[in-house]
Image (spheres, helix red, strand yellow):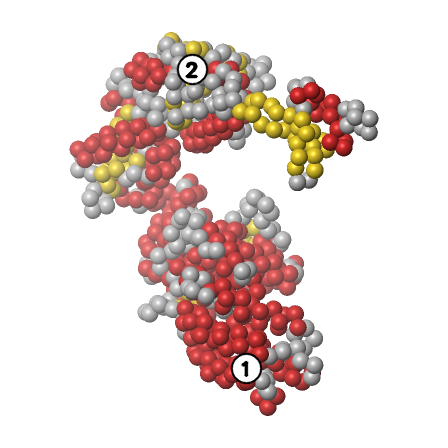
């Protein structure tokens, strides 16, 4: 069976567009061919800055013919009392291109309907692809489409050619101003073309051998890494590969040629992070280091051609980078001469959020909030502790680097440079580490701060931002979250859990709101805290579900309390383990029944959980009271120490007694005193259970 190949030639498309374009082409061609009934053996997409290629292997030359039964109007609506067809019947057969004589009666559970048999598929694959290709090309999504010349057609970049071959047959169609053919073009310098491609399978060797194009992104990455590693090894070093940058660089070329450049070792006095940022962000180049992680005065860049004079090209790259590094060294020396104190004062002139004051005000709030956190956090891991003075100092210095010359030039280094400058200024190591780590985690896959002081500062910073934004009603809506509040809440969740920290987040948010002082006069404090807690609970739910937990388990656990994230996580793990044990369903039903009785029948009653043993008449209720008297003290002890798996074992042991109570006792007795006493007996059971999980939320 023949193969099919489509090549869309364009002006240079940004590298960030290419992965999604490949995915879209694979998905759209797969869906289109499957819908048309065209069989094929394999489908792949490739891209370079100047082209997107779809290759479909072993394509059937004709689509599979299928017959389907199409149901129309009910028979009573299809024909009148005289047996004549109605407009409904005539319209139905006309829509499907068949004659009324070909229709028949289809008996269904809902009655008789007019129906027809219609054959679909069976068409020539060439015709199907000729129709499918232009619609797919025109429908490809881009963040912003371009239009060129006098044409109305829009695409990510101007189209230059389209090649479409089914075996050795050219499929002809038009896309905007371009008509498809069998002509391709290669690399602009090493194989510009045009080249006539005789068949679909000939495109790949033509691009490789005549066009000097490396079509496959995986192959481009391999070439860059292998040649780059060899060049660095020759200098006694290794490349500092940044995978995100490598993805971008391979997408910027279709004829990758790595070269190694150098710079004056004197620039190594500038911090490593600054040098790497200069190379990576501005020059799309990689640093080189020794085996013991010392930066070397070299960099690796990737060209999109083989230069006739590599030395001349290398000098050009070195000259451009030298200018960047000279700027960085100037900023470094200027900042060191300034010191931290003037920067702290200057922060009072830097706006945080207009109604929320300055960055100077924010650092003073963080100073107080960090100090408060050291006193109110519960450290569950042996040996964990944080100096209150160091945490407060880290909060005060957290934003000073925002007014440094280095961060004005390299804004991605905020926090990192603050930590470096704090060390240079003689601040304690704990303070400098915290300042450097304050923006962690930067995303779901980013690490949390390595130090506890950094974790405290990070949580304080996020809580302060959440409190201010919610106070001003600047809350996320749909996909819009301009202040990163979802990420801020998720960061607090991850830090509490990963660092083993216990804290009532509602108290943290209340303290953060309180920190705004006079500004809170414009807040509705009660509503602010209520909405903020609701938002945080939803983020916590999404976090647990995203980590693979069952949704019902998450809802049950959070229904029993979400304010202590670490305890909620431990309860969820215990419930998930309990759900895999025998008789789990029966245990849930038993305790769910108890919770439902209290919720429904306890309305109007004041239930304290205290009951009068003298009013217990039935053996089953006496047995339950005795069992509760034995188990509840143990329950309290286990709960105090977070022994949640053991708590579920206790519940399993308690279930037979509770089942016997329901079998032998009428809770809603006619005597009001007996009824209230039995409800309080159940309340004594349900109250501790409600701190473990909301059993009513577990559907069996």
User: CA–CA distance between discs 2 and 1?
Assistant: 81 Å
> Which of 562/437 is in front?
562
Residue 635 place in picture, x, y as percent? 46, 77
Q: Where, by quadrant of the figure, is residue 221 drawn? A: top left
Task: Give the vertical position of 126 relative to 286 (above or below).
Answer: above
> Which of 59/291 is in front?
59
> Which of 56/378 is in front?
56
How crowded pointer 1 is (Cα within 10 Å; few <14, some 14-19, many 20+) is rated as some
Disc on res. 166: 2
Q: Is residue 42 left or right of residue 351?
A: left
Q: Which residue has dot 1 on it? A: 620
Give the number of the mark in front: 2 or 1: 1
The disc, 2 or 1, on the residue closer to the chain's N-terminal end is 2
Q: Residue at x 28, y 19 (%)?
A: 307
Residue 23 place in picture, x, y as percent? 44, 31
Q: Is residue 471 left or right of residue 316?
A: right
Q: Residue at x 63, y 78 (%)?
A: 666
Q: Residue furthest right?
A: 82
Asked which secondary structure carries label 2, the reply is strand
Q: Where, by quadrant of the figure, is residue 232 drawn? A: top left
Q: Residue at x 31, y 16 (%)?
A: 205
Q: Residue at x 19, y 35 (%)?
A: 233
Q: Is residue 622 left or right of residue 110?
A: left
């Amino acid at each position: 069976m023949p193969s099919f190949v489509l090549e869309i030639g364009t002006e240079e498309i940004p590298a960030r567009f290419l992965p999604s374009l490949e995915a879209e082409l694979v998905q759209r061609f797969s869906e289109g061919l499957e819908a048309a009934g065209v069989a094929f053996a394999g489908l792949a997409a490739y891209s370079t800055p100047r082209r997107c290629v779809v290759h479909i292997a072993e394509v059937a030359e004709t689509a599979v013919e299928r017959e389907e039964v199409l149901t129309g109007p009910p028979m009573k609506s299809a024909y009148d009392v005289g047996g004549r067809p109605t407009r409904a019947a005539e319209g139905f057969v006309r829509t499907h291109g068949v004659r009324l004589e070909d229709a028949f009666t289809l008996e269904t559970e809902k009655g008789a309907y007019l129906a027809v048999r219609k054959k679909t598929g069976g068409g020539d694959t060439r015709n199907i692809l000729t129709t499918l290709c232009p619609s797919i090309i025109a429908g490809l999504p881009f963040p912003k489409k371009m239009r060129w010349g006098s044409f109305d057609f829009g695409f990510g970049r101007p189209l230059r050619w389209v090649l479409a071959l089914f075996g050795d047959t050219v499929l002809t169609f038009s896309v905007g101003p371009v008509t498809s053919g069998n002509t391709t073009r290669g690399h602009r310098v090493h194989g510009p073309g045009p080249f006539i491609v005789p068949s679909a399978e000939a495109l790949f060797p033509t691009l490789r051998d005549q066009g000097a194009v490396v079509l496959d992104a995986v192959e481009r990455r391999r070439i860059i890494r292998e040649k780059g590693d060899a060049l660095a090894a020759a200098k006694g070093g290794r490349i500092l590969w940044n995978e995100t940058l490598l993805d971008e660089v391979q997408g910027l070329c279709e004829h990758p040629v790595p070269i190694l450049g150098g710079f004056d070792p004197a620039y190594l006095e500038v911090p490593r992070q600054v040098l790497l940022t200069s190379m990576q962000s501005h020059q799309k180049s990689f640093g080189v280091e020794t085996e013991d992680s010392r930066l070397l005065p070299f960099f690796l860049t990737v060209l999109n051609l083989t230069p006739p004079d590599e030395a001349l090209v290398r000098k050009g790259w070195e000259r451009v980078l030298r200018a960047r590094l000279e700027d960085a060294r100037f900023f470094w020396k200027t900042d060191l001469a300034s010191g931290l104190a003037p920067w702290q004062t200057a922060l009072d002139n830097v706006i945080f959020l207009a109604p929320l004051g300055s960055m100077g005000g924010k650092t003073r709030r963080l100073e107080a909030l960090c100090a408060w956190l050291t006193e109110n956090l519960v450290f569950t891991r042996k040996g964990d502790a944080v100096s209150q003075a160091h945490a407060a100092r880290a909060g005060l210095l957290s934003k000073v680097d925002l007014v440094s010359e280095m961060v004005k030039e390299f804004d991605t280094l905020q926090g990192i440079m603050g930590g470096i400058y704090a060390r240079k200024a003689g601040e304690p190591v704990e303070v400098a580490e915290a300042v450097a780590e304050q923006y962690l985690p930067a995303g779901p896959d980013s690490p949390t701060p390595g130090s506890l002081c950094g974790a405290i500062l990070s949580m304080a910073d996020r809580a302060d931002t959440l409190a201010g934004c919610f106070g001003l009603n600047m809350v996320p809506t749909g996909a819009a979250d301009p202040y990163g509040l979802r990420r801020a809440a998720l960061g607090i969740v991850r830090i509490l859990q990963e660092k083993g920290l216990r804290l009532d987040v509602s108290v943290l948010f209340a303290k953060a709101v309180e920190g705004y002082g006079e500004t809170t006069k414009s807040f509705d404090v009660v509503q602010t805290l209520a909405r903020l807690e609701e938002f945080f609970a939803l983020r916590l739910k999404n976090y647990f579900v995203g980590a693979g937990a069952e949704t019902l388990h998450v809802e049950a656990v959070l229904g029993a309390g979400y304010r202590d994230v670490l305890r909620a996580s431990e309860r969820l793990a215990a419930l998930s383990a309990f759900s895999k044990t025998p008789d789990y369903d029966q245990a849930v039903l038993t305790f769910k029944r108890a919770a439902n009785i209290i919720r429904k029948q306890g309305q109007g009653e004041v239930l304290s959980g205290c009951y009068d043993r003298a009013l217990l008449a039935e053996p089953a209720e006496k047995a339950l009271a005795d069992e509760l008297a034995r188990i509840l003290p143990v329950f309290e002890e286990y709960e105090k120490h977070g022994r949640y798996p053991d708590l579920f074992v206790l519940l399993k042991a308690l279930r037979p007694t509770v089942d016997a109570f329901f079998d032998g006792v009428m809770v809603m007795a006619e005597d009001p005193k007996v009824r209230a006493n039995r409800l309080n007996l159940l309340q004594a059971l349900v109250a501790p259970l409600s701190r473990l999980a909301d059993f009513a939320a577990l559907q069996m």
